[in-house]
Amino acid sequence: MADYGWPDAEHRTLIGKRITRVDSPVKVSGQAKYTYDVKRPGMLFGKILRCPYAYAKVVSIDASAAEKMPGVKAIHIIQGPNSTIHWAGDEVVAVAAVDEPTAEDAVRAIKVKYQKLSHLVSDAEPPKGAAQAQGPLSMDDIDDMLDNQVPARQMVEQIQQYGITSKPDEGTLKGLQEDGATDEVIKAIRAATVHPEAGSRPKSNYQKAAAQTLGDGEKAFAQAEVISEGLYGVPVITHCCLESHGSTSEWTDNDHLLVHMSTQNVSGIAGQMAEPLKIPATNIRVHQDHIGGGFGSKFSPDRWGIATAEVSKKAGGKPVRIMLERDSELKVAGARPSAYARVRVGAKRDGTIVAWQSESWGTGGPGGGGMPPIPYVFSIPNQRKEHTAIRNNIGPARAWRAPNHPQAAVITMCALDDLAAKLNMDPLDFFLKNIELGKPRQAIYTEELGIASDLMGWKQKWHPRGQNKSGNLARGVGLSLHTWGGRGHASDCDLTIHPDGSVDIKMGSQDLGTGTRTCILMVAADTLGIPMDTISLQIGDTMYPPSGGSGGSTTIGGVSSSTRRAAVDAREGLFAKVAPALNAQPAELESINGTVRVKGDSSRSLSWKEACSKLGAMPLTVRGKNPDKSKPPDLTNSGVGGVQMAEVEVDTDTGIVKVKKMVAVQDCGLVIDVKTAESQCHGALIMGISYSLFEEKVMDPTTGRMLNPDMQYYRLAGLNDIPELVVHMMTGKGYDERGVIGLGEPPVISPGAAISNAVANAIGVRVPFLPLTPDRVLGAFQKAGA
Amino acid sequence: MRDDDPNQNEKVDERSGVSRRDFLKISSISVAVPLVTGPKVVFAAGEQVPVHGPGKVPMEFTINGKKHKADLEPRVTLLDALRDEFDLTGAKRVCDRAECGACTVLMDNKAVYACSVLAIEAQGRQIATVESLMQGDKLHPVQQAFVDNDASQCGFCTPGFVVACKAFLDKHPNPTPEDIRRGLSGNLCRCGTYHGIQLAIAQLAQKGA
Ligand code: FES
Ligand code: FES
């Protein structure tokens, strides 16, 4: 069988090198077309009327005035009378008009009456006694979950765990299906245990999950010699993709739809639009050239994406563009769940961690949300954990780079850092002392901690807490560890070699700005022995073979493997045709530097072009797949460890925190393109600085609305906030052989904890919650009486 | 708006003879007048002010050295005119209110936020967008430096950043790191490309580009 395995370092021409991103030129010149830039002939502009209340019922909608306005082409009711609205900004009516100003006027002319209900937008610690044990689910609960876009997997888990309050009839099940329940969810409902008695209990906003325990927490705390207690947390933040969510839809005939959508999931969108639009998925073509950011928030067509197709249909199938305005983007298009915890953690005098106890809470909006994976990285032998999910009206949560991990890192690494301080230990020594609890990655962490420490100058910079101050400027350093999976997703790749020597690749993947295009071309070119720019690559269309959604750091593994297998098979296919001409066996051939030749005999060689002409009249197309057990080895792997260190300077008069330096040391198996991989890490550090110091979705308890839905008060880090950044990728022996592992998530996990720990080290007190704003820093001082 | 002159916006407005204050007055008056094309003059706050719209009015622009004509409502921004009328989509619409710099274009050689300039006010000015920077197939040195230093990821902020950097370097050919931090803090990037941008600028400054 052909050898699909990754070539070793001596036999790679491109893989593992620093290669410049292939789509940079179109991006820097403004030629790259994003969904927001697509303008179709005769295109109408859509706008959405959104509910101003956080919790309300729609009573009536009067769109008659808007209908009569010149230039208004269609009006589509998204949530009609009797619908329940669960967050401010939810979609009620869509309009399409000849231009944007007219569409805006039309939205203003629509009169909607609401009945306001009393909302909750707080995610503060649950009041004593408010939390209710999570119980069986009613069909209304399940419908609400669908409405609130709770992922199917999570719904199935809850249905299986808690059962249901009544057995639904077939009509109800059909209704749920129409509202978007997947087959798995319906199956889970059919199989669920029924608890009729639970149906009459009123629902609390605070749902407490059963306590999780490990070992004997009580005994371990009794035996612990030092115990540290603290409060830690991370608020809700948003994705704030610079290209907002949205799409342009048009009906090419009565039942065929063409969609340009800003999405991380090109191949997965049609399937999600088929059911609500009542057409087969095969009739829906989805296209995207470039995407202006996703970060986990763009996997679904969303209610507004469906509405865009509906309003287009009502406008006679004309193309309609609806891209969210910035305020809507921040209000409704995605948020990262909050997580807070009161933590007790105990150790022996020598620093050995023995016990963990946490009461955590947080919100993912109307869907509630689960406990982050705490204690993180360190498997502490004795644990007791309780978590209360807050269901409230802040809007739905979505995956945000490394879902739940940054929160877990803050809660765990900050609690451990406080314990180290109480033990009078340097946290670097303390973490190393307990590194065995970081199984199975203890060896990687140890190596990475050593490298990070050198790059940071940790030993020179670390002082006991609060002891490195000159005047009003306090300096400190902090660190954090993290982990992630990142195995490659399912991916199909079609690679064609034409008789004239040209090569094309087609794949329904997408490049989020992570370098996906570049890496696909590197793998193909390296395998075929031809230059990257001789290969034409097409991605971003449902016309091409399906490739998974870009989430969970799974893209690089998926696309690099499917491309490798396709390229190897294509190369073998070509060798079979070329071998007679070179008077050799196919197995004796190699393809290198634009020639096909007999291994070790450059006198028997053909140029790539000549070799391809031996294909005859027909091009050679092969499909590579990931995963593909029939073509071993597995080219991807899962499970990485990373270490980050931060150095900060805090002005103790003003409370302003400045990050001065950050170090990231990261493994991710075989790195395809070192240049774009480093950029991922730099970007993640910068995003991490942003959420550590500035970002928070601030909700107004009175109106239930987001108070900062703009880019002035929802602040992102700017160039001025960026310190010296040092990135070190773990590559070479011991790493490369593991195969390809994703990198999008891992480096964004640790900045919050590392920076918070550095601030605690600088000022001598813990600032419990991110972002570390001046008022929080000064508040922490005040509380400590410092 | 991003340079060392906090009043730049006001100054730009002064040269056109309409201050921001007047603009606010005009826009509030325009809703009250009947649908007309062509300016009408009304007396407001002791001054004669031309009133356009609210219907579409003919406008003429000079963009990247070429004349462009369109009938637009007076409330349409320069950014929307560029993107939706003339298919110049390099400048992006992100915040639409002068907070992010993704829409940066040059107006009489000064960097401005196109989302915060009315199209009607941009008439008679030299507008240059990111699309004008390439010479044939050759990238502008600022663009090449962005490519070399991997200063774009998703790339949505990139055109705005490129134009802002060009304007900045034209004014500060030898910037200090402090100049760079201050001069380019009017543009935001979500993917976190600032590191690459800093390297790109440093490379250009060395070359004296
Ligand atoms: S879109 Fe103009 S500054 Fe943000
Ligand atoms: S490169 Fe994505 S926003 Fe800057």
Image (spheres, coloured by chain):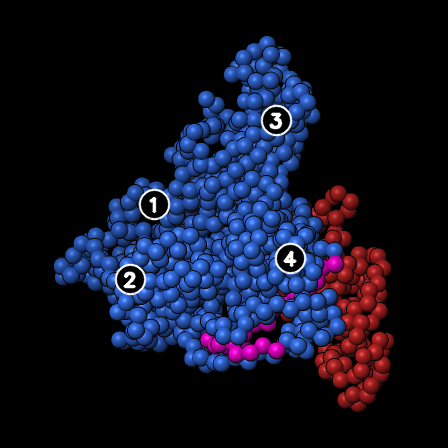
Chain colours: A blue, B red
**Could you say whether the residue bearing mark 2 is in a helix, strand or loop?**
loop
Which callout, 1 or 4, points to the residue nearer the camera? Answer: 4
Q: CA distance from mark 3 to mark 2?
A: 57 Å
**Could you say whether the residue bearing mark 4 is in a helix, strand or loop?**
strand
For label 4, count other residues whose C-alpha is less than 10 Å away and answer few (under 14), some (14-19) or many (20+): many
**Could you say whether the residue bearing mark 1 is in a helix, strand or loop?**
helix
For disc 3, the marked residue is A620
Q: Is residue A779 left or right of residue B198?
A: left
Q: Which residues are magenta?
A: A42-62
Q: CA distance from mark 1 to mark 4?
A: 47 Å
Could you say which is closer to the camera, residue B146 or residue A506? A506
Does residue A623 appear in this view?
yes
Does residue A736 appear in this view?
no
Cβ–Cβ below 8 Å for labels 3 and 2?
no
Q: Is residue A279 left or right of residue A317?
A: left
Residue furthest toward the top?
Answer: A583
Relative height, residue A627 to residue A540 (above, below):
above
Residue A445, numbered circle: 1
Which callout, 1 or 2, points to the residue nearer the camera? Answer: 2
Residue type at the position of mark 4: Thr
Which comes sooner in the sequence, label 2 or label 4? 2
Which comes sooner in the sequence, label 3 or label 1? 1
